[in-house]
Every structure is written in structure tokens, then in C-alpha cells.
Amino acid sequence: MHAWRRALGRSGALAVLLAAVVIVSAGVGPVWIPPTDIAAILLDAVAVPTAVDLSGPTLEVTTRSLLRVPVDEVDRQIVMRVRLPRILLGAVVGFSLAAAGTVMQGIFRNPMADPSIIGVSSGAAVGAVGVIVAPVAVPTGLGIRGAAFVGALAAAFGVYLIATENGRTPVATLLLAGVAVQTFLGAVVSFLLLRSGESIRRALFWLMGHLKGATWPEVWTTLPLVLLPTLVLLAYARDLNVMLLGEEDARSLGIDVERTKRVLLGTASLVTAAGVAVAGVVGFVGLIVPHVMRLVVGPDHRVLLPTAGVAGASFLVATDTLARSGAVEVPVGIVTAALGAPFFLYLLRQREVHDL
């Protein structure tokens, strides 16, 4: 079967699983809502715009439901205003981390690589914690998420510049530069935390990764920043397959290795930055999910990349549901680490994690 056809089939099956996870997750909370009611609310939400008002300071769009499914108004408000933005933002972030992790493991040909390997998460942490601790020291209006996004991209670009010489970027040098920059930025974050005073709780909450307080504008802003670059990654999936043979063999087969690495690193960093900026540092999604999906669908990145993305979306939605279902909500990053680390060790013991 052609690779793209397999990718479509596998991704479609995982999308059905994601839809089921979303419906169950939307019903979980202080007020339990049955899955059938959630499905009715989602069907009722399918609407078309009927009028646009441009007279006010903001764009007002009037919509009309296509299906007009009878639903309880209180349940509809809970789902559409509170739970669904958080769930969909979690799906987008999970997709971004898993897709970027798949690409990083392919570039580095290293099963331990994840989206933070070139300092993206550490750069985002410096930006976000810097705004929390010393808001007057950063450009006004940037905000925590904007500062995290800028910090993530700046760290990735800095690592790339450090590792590049005479137009070539050796993977080993890139890895070592990433480790060094991560260590330095970790020290900066530690210093900022020491100076954070009463803001330390807020800074630690961001560093642990969370989706609390997600809004629809965050969903609509993050979605294109993840999906559009992912199309670029898919376009280079075949070249990434060839690069697994080694850079010299890839060159002999006609691949422009340096340009391919630049595009993949830059695009994967952008995807990671978009996710980390809105959710904080969420570990293990970009490490575990690509491994699991590689065992299921094989190493072909034309199939692995989209399936890992959709599986990562389901994983983060499920873990965030666990994070908020107890008596006290915990940051989702704690849950992903608590579940991901033992599972990764299990794979290691079973010798399921090996060279790519």
C-alpha cells in the first residue's frame, strides 16, 4: 500500500480515537455530563455565519446552528465556554510536541532526542519566567506567551548558529551545543526563581506545564502555527527517511542535507515553540509518543509523522483529563512525566527502544 494512503488510513483511525477521548474528556469535571449529551452539544455547535457586524471596535459574527439539536443550556455553556477550549488546546499542543519529537529523533538519529534537545523549552522558560518575575524588564505588551514564544525561537536559532561553521551543521556539534545552551538557560531560570519572591508559585506552575484557563483565541492562534509548519515537515518526510541512512549516503542519493536540516530544525522549533508558549514545559510527550507509534506503524516518516501527531493529541488530552479530575488539579506536566517515565523504562527493559 502506498505510504501516503497508509498515513491517511492510520491517521483517520487515530482521529476517531481522538474524537472519543475528546467527548469523554468534555464530560469529566465537577459537573458530570454524559457522552451522548456531549455529542449533542458538539453537533449543535456546527454552525454557519449569517451576518458580520463591522460597526463596533471588534468583529462580531452572527452564526446559525445547522442541525439545531436540543441541548441543556447550562451543559452547553460548561462545555463550549470552559472545557472545550482547554481540550482542543491540549490536542493542538500534544500534536505539536509529538510531531516535533518525531522529526528531532529522525534528524539526530537518536531515540533519546525530543523537541527540547536544541534548547527550545529552556528558551521558552527563560522568556516566560522573565515576564513573571520582572515584567518591566521585557518589552511591554509581549505577555508571558509571547515572551515564551520569542525565547524558544531565539534559543533554537542561537544553538543553530553556534553549531554551524562554513555552512555545515554537524549533528554531533548541534547536540552538544544544545546541551550546553540548555544548561546555561537552566541556570538563568534558577536565578530568576531565586529572585521571584511572591511570584515563585506562578513561575513554578508555568514550568510544570498546564492548560488551565485556556481560551478560544489561544486555540485559534496556536492552531495555524502548528498545522501549517507540519505540512512543511510532511513535505520533507521522504528526505528525512533518506537521511536515516547517514548524511554521506543521503548526499550521494541527491539530498541537499544542509538545507534539509535547516528547514526541518527551523520548522520543528517553530511547532514546538507554538505549543510550549501556551502550555509551558510538558515533558515526555515528544519522547514517548514517537517511540510507541514507530513500533505500531514503522519508521517511514511519511506515516509516522502524522500518526504520532494525532496520537500525541489524544495522549495529552487524556493526561490533562486525569490532571484535572482529582480533588485538587495538578499541572499536566507532572502527569505526563509520572506516566511517561515508567513506560519509557519498560520499553528500555523490553529492548523496544533502539537505534533508528
Image (cartoon, rainbow, N blue to C red):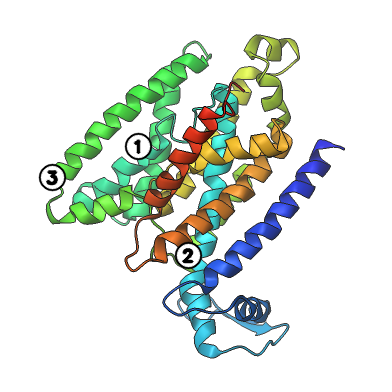
* CB contact under 8 Å: marks 2 and 3: no
Residue 323 spot, x, y in % from top left: 41, 59
Residue 109 vertical placement versus 272 (above, below): above
* Residue visible at 49% across and 78% down in the picture: 32
Which of the marked residues, 2 or 1, is nearer the chain's N terminus? Answer: 2
Q: Which residue is mark 2?
A: 86
Query: In screen coordinates, is 238 left or right of 75?
Result: right
Residue 31 spot, x, y in % from top left: 45, 80
* Residue visible at 69% across and 30% down in the picture: 299
Q: Amino acid at mark 2?
A: Arg
Q: Which residue is mark 3?
A: 195
State which quadrant residue 237 falls in: top right
- Label 3, residues with CA under 10 Å away: few <14, some 14-19, many ≥20: few
Residue 251 vertical placement versus 329 (above, below): above
* Residue visible at 40% across and 64% down in the picture: 324
* CB contact under 8 Å: marks 3 and 1: no
- Can you name the residue that lies furthest to the right here? 1
Q: Looking at the image, is mark 2 or mark 3 nearer the viewer? A: 2
Q: Amino acid at mark 1?
A: Ser
- Label 2, residues with CA under 10 Å away: few <14, some 14-19, many ≥20: many
Q: Which residue is mark 1?
A: 122
Which of the marked residues, 3 or 1, is nearer the chain's N terminus? Answer: 1
Q: Amino acid at mark 3?
A: Arg
Name the residue nearer the viewer: 55 or 331. 331
Q: Report helix, strand or loop for mark 1.
A: helix
Name the residue nearer the viewer: 76 or 330. 330
Query: In screen coordinates, is 216 left or right of 69?
Result: left
In 3D space, how far apart are the residues under numbered discs 2 and 3 (Cα atoms)?
A: 31 Å
